[in-house]
Amino acid sequence: MRRPLLAALALLTLSGMMPASAQETLEDARARRETIAEEAADNASRIDALEAEDAEIVAALEEIDTWIAIQEARLDRARQELAATVEVEAEAWARADALAARIGELQLELAAQLVDGYVQGFRNDDGLLLDTEDLNSVPLLRFVIDETSGATAATTDLLRLAQDQQADAIAEAEQARREAEDLRDEIEGRIADLEASRVVQEQLRAEVAQRIAALEDEAAILADEDTQITEFIRAEEERIRREAEEAQRRAEEEAQRLAEEEAQRLAEEEAQRQAEEEAQRQAEETPPDGDSPPDAEAQPDAEAQPDGEAPPDAEDGTEPEPEPEPEPEPQPRDGVPSFARPVDGAISSPYGYRTHPIYGTVRLHTGIDFNSPFGAPIRASANGTVIFVGSFSGYGNTVIVEHGNGYSTLYAHMSGYDTRTGASVSQGETVGFVGSTGLSTGPHLHFEIRLDGVAIDPAPLL
């Protein structure tokens, strides 16, 4: 029995195709990589914003440090001034103490001068004192004052000057100390405020640094995941490429082998046809007396007689050559794809046995011929995956689409293609154009439906 055309090719090609689950996994990985890229970009933007905020905080801290340095310099000067005023105050109190001692001396000296002046006054005028009945009388007092005023005036002035100087020194010292203490307290307050601001800014910077670190950790995780997914995608794409190349190579080898078998079969049929023609010619040249070439009876020409009739020399009991037995068709199964007509146009030759239009022999026509004009679009009969695109023996330019569950369709004699091996096609999508390549007598589409590689009648499924 002749091997079904392209059965092995379909099986080999399908075995090398990538499973739908692998394709979905690869698409999921690509989608995840895009999501990671978006998350990484968002992370980078947030890190940039935080780093800008950190830069502002650093600038604020630098400004605070500058102000603290200025205030500390002022505080140093204030402390120096306070120390100086303390020394001034101490000196003032020392002067005040010295003046106090001097004042005591002056007071004693003044008292002594008053006593001395009073005594000397009596000595200068004994009669006046003796004649005075009352020592407390006004003339006596006036005399004492007059006598003592000149002597004590200088001492009194010195006393008053010392007292004034003492009071001024104390007031000056106390004022300088209060001012220095006020300046010191003011600067220390400012420094305390600046230090508090610095603490707040440093806390803010620590929070920003913590957030940046968290985002950077997340970015590192995303980068690691992106690397892993990229490596996975690259490995999957490389595996798919190798498998596709291997499947294509095996398909081409199988197609070449089948083409060689087909060519050999055609050559054998041609040799048989020529032998039959030679036998017919010899039979026609047989002399009227019934003599014939030795092998005439061994070469009956069944195709030259009407269907079911034996050749003229079959009356001696020789049986005519039987028609070839059709190969058993696979039984339909569940999950039959929904097929549609691939082109517009009438059916010019249905599925079944017929006389070959070129060879003139009876053989199984494994598909349906549609009478369509040259260049008309050929549509995929159902959803599927293209497993073969190329020239194939007598089919000429051919496209084969696999639909799952063992079903495939074949489109032959194309003038050109509009698809590629491995492409996913939808029902109604153009895969090529009507032509007359291969063994063809004119433009038409030869369309087949195969189940497990064996041609079946497409009519009931369209």
Image (cartoon, grey):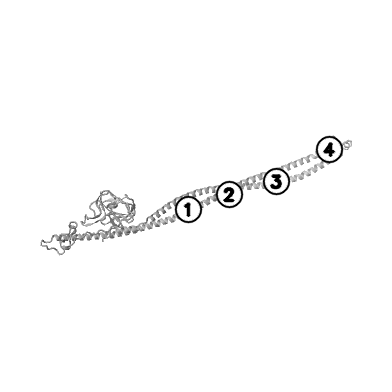
Amino acid type assigned to the residue bearing label 1 in the image: Ala
Residue annotated with mark 1? 219
Q: Judging from the image, what secondary structure is the residue with disc 1 in?
A: helix
Q: CA distance from mark 2 to mark 1?
A: 30 Å
Note whether 149 is above or below 283 in the view shown.
above
Q: Residues within 10 Å of mark 4 (few under 14, many from 20)?
A: some
Query: For this rendering, which residue is in front, 409 or 224?
Result: 409
Instruction: Decide which of tag 1 and tag 3 comes sooner along the chain.
Output: 3
Q: CA distance from mark 4 to mark 3?
A: 42 Å
Quarter of the image where one finds residue 114: top right
Mark in front: 3 vs 2: 2
Q: Position of residue 368 (x, y in %)?
A: 26, 53
User: Which mark is nearer the camera, 4 or 2?
Assistant: 2
Q: Are marks 4 and 3 in contact (CB under 8 Å)?
A: no
Residue at left offset 81%, top offset 42%: 111
Q: Which residue is mark 4?
A: 144
Q: Residue 450's mark?
A: none
Q: Residue furthest left?
A: 289
- Seen in the picture, residue 389 relative to 317 is either above or below; the reply is above
Q: Do the CB atoms of the residues marked 4 and 1 lie less than 8 Å apart?
A: no
Q: Position of residue 155 (x, y in %)?
A: 78, 41
Given contact means CB atoms under 8 Å apart, are the residues at marks 3 and 2 in contact? no
Is disc 1 in contact with disc 3, using a CB cutoff of under 8 Å?
Answer: no
Residue under the image location 71 percent in, 46 percent down: 91
| Label 3: element kind | helix
Query: Which comes sooner in the sequence, label 2 or label 1?
Result: 2
Q: Nearer the viewer, residue 191 or 432?
A: 432
Q: Which residue is mark 3?
A: 89
